Amino acid sequence: MADIELPNPEELEEQKKDVFSKRVALCTALFAVILAITSLGGNNASKQMMLSQQQSSNLWAYYQSKVTREHLYRVEKQKAEAQLVERGRAMNAQARDLYEKNRQVYAAEEKRYGEEKREIEQNAKKLEQQRDIGIAKDPYFDYAEVLLQIAIVMASISILSGSRPVFGISIACAIMGSFLCLNGYLLLVRLPFLD
């Protein structure tokens, strides 16, 4: 009868550990990919938030200049109306026509600046909404990054120690981090402690 060589139990244990290490390494690589996607989302949310804030500030400054111009034309219109009332019929026809024409120009300019002002206000408020969305998204990405980094570290520790419970903690952190990343992109749920 032929001799059958039985595998050494230590070698089997090492091969089993090696399979575990390879699987954990693949999971760690997946965690790193999710971390990169999270980092991208966080950076984009921050950039969008800052850009929207700058643009809305610029529009509010522009709005303020429109308000000032509108007010100046209103004052000039009121002066022309007061001149027309004060002098009344004593004013010569040519001067009266000029005051009336100026009053109409001032009224038209006041109206134009008022309409432009409302349009600017709407655009500024849209930008403020974009800024607020970026502000809402940012903490989700921040915490997702932290959890994914912890998951990577814990996975590395589990490879070195061969500990399955440590790898379980790593997976739990990665799942929470992945959820927060997804929530950062989609804002599916508002978590009160992150708002």
Image (tube, grey):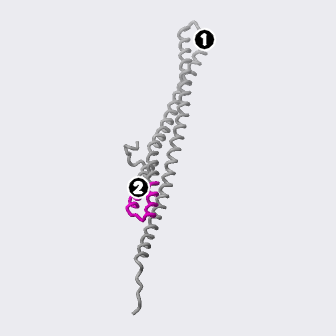
User: What is the residue that sits farthest to the right in this orientation?
Assistant: 94
The amino acid sitting under disc 2 is: Cys
The amino acid sitting under disc 1 is: Ala
Residue at 44 percent of width and 45 percent of height: 139
Please determine whether, in this image, residue 64 is positioned above or below residue 81: below
| Residue 54 found in image quarter | top right
Residue at 39 percent of width and 49 percent of height: 188
In this picture, which residue range is highlighted in magenta?
Answer: 149-172
Magenta residues, dominant SS class: helix
Q: Is residue 91 left or right of residue 153?
A: right
Tell me the residue that label 2 is attached to. 173
Asked if residue 164 lies in the magenta stretch, the reply is: yes
Crowd band around label 2 with a 10 angstrom C-alpha radius: few (<14), some (14–19), many (20+): many
> 89 or 161: nearer the eye?
161
User: Circle 1 sits in a helix, a strand or a loop, which is it?
Assistant: helix
User: Circle 2 sits in a helix, a strand or a loop, which is it?
Assistant: helix
Tell me the residue that label 1 is attached to. 93
Residue at 61 percent of width and 9 percent of height: 92
Q: Is the C-beta separation of discs 1 and 2 under 8 Å?
A: no
Residue at 52 percent of width and 30 percent of height: 117
Where residue 4 appears, as percent x and y from the top left, is 41, 87
> 173 or 91: nearer the eye?
173
Q: Is residue 52 left or right of residue 170?
A: right
Please determine whether, in this image, residue 128 is positioned above or below residue 96: below
> 31 or 13: nearer the eye?
13
Q: Is residue 57 left or right of residue 8?
A: right
Please determine whether, in this image, residue 132 is positioned above or below residue 186: above
Where residue 68 appears, as percent x and y from the top left, is 55, 24
Marking on residue 184: none
Please determine whether, in this image, residue 11 is positioned above or below residue 48: below
| Residue 16 found in image quarter | bottom left
Where residue 77 appears, as percent x and y from the top left, is 55, 18
